[in-house]
Amino acid sequence: MLATLSMLTLSSCEDQSKKAEAEVPLVTVEVAKVDHDVIRAAGTGEIKARVQSDLSFKVSGRVIERHVSVGDRVKAGQVLATLDPTEQLADIESAKAGVAAQEATLRKSSSVLNRRKTLIQTGALSQQEVDSAQQEFLSAQKDLDAAKAALETSQEALEQTELKADADGTITARDVEVGQVVQASSTVFTLAHDGARDAVFNVQENALSTGANPISLTVSLLSRPEISVPAKVREISPTLDRSLGTVRVKLSIENPPPEMTLGAAIVADVVMAQQDRISIPWQSMFSKEGKSAVWVVDKDALTTTLKPVQVERYDADRVVLASGLEPGELVVVDGVQFLREQQKVAISKGAAQ
């Protein structure tokens, strides 16, 4: 009986020991490390010419020829479209006739003035008659100048029936067809000038509220991310697009690669700030009195403590902390649901070191 009692007592102690071991939870931990935290932002936009002009005729008329279309490369001075010049040609002929008539009038008044100057020397005419002839001569000269000016205006109007490119570039918009009657100053073509290019984006207003300048800006093609160039902020629109709640931002691109053509879709990678911070996995987050906290494990005693932390921001797979943890602390990653203060735990062999 004594032997049996001794065996039962030993078995009971072993069961209690196994039960105590079973109650020690197994947790996965991660060593808190300071990483180089980079705050980034990204957005999509398109490549546009820094300078573009709206081309229009200075006279009204009917379009009889259109020489270019959207996407065509043009040179400065190249004729893009032509109006019917019938009216301008008629004005020129009328102006030429006016000049001829005024030239005849000037010749006649000059002859009269010369005769009267000769006769006044003989006393046959009075000075008043000579002065009158002089006034008629001067008036005829002014009329001739006016007629010549009218002829130049008519010739200029004829030249305006041809719309020419004001710079080398690419046609990006067309608003006219052959046979269409256009009014003076109405836009016919939009010309994107060769030279510097801008990356244009529509940015949410709150993204600009801090007023901080980005550390770096890189623009790359949406279809080919490996093609990228540095950029810098050139212009921020002072007005807000009320329908979208966005602000237009232009980034200057110096010497863009040939692949970045007009209208190409691009992505801007913006580095807003850099700072050394500790980040932890999402599953490490816990709550203490409604505030963010994490469980940490004492390396020597293997007991748990719930520490409050301040969150800087939430990324896709990590939580970046502003404060609360020190480098080297063991943070519980898996098994936080059933822990309590100063609880003995066992660390999984697969834990991060």
Image (spheres, rainbow, N blue to C red):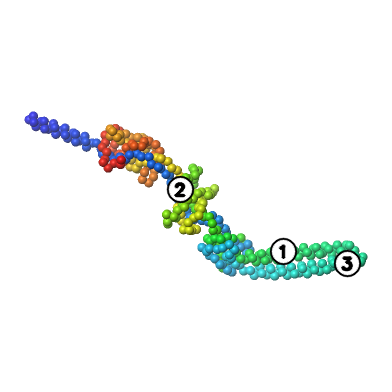
Whole-number angstrom distance, CA of label 3 to CA of label 2: 90 Å
- Mark 2 or 1: the one toward you: 2
Amino acid type, mark 3: Thr
Picture coordinates of residue 168, whole percent (x, y): 56, 61
Residue 90 appears in the rendering: yes
Whole-number angstrom distance, CA of label 2 to CA of label 1: 59 Å
User: Residue at image x 77%, y 63%?
Assistant: 142
Picture coordinates of residue 213, whole percent (x, y): 49, 44
- Residue 314: numbered disc: none
Residue tagged by mark 1?
149
Element under label 3?
A: helix
Picture coordinates of residue 233, whole percent (x, y): 51, 48
User: Residue at image x 51%, y 53%?
Assistant: 254
Q: Is residue 120 above or below residue 296?
A: below
Which residue ends up furthest to the top in the rendered image? 2
Residue 291 appears in the rendering: no
Is the residue under label 2 in contact with that under label 3 (CB below 8 Å)?
Answer: no
Amino acid type, mark 1: Ala
Image position of 140 (left or right of 1)? right
Is the residue under label 1 in contact with that under label 2 (CB below 8 Å)?
Answer: no
User: Residue at image x 82%, y 67%?
Assistant: 110
- Residue 118: numbered disc: 3
Element under label 1?
A: helix
User: Residue at image x 73%, y 70%?
Assistant: 97
Residue tagged by mark 2?
270
Amino acid type, mark 2: Val
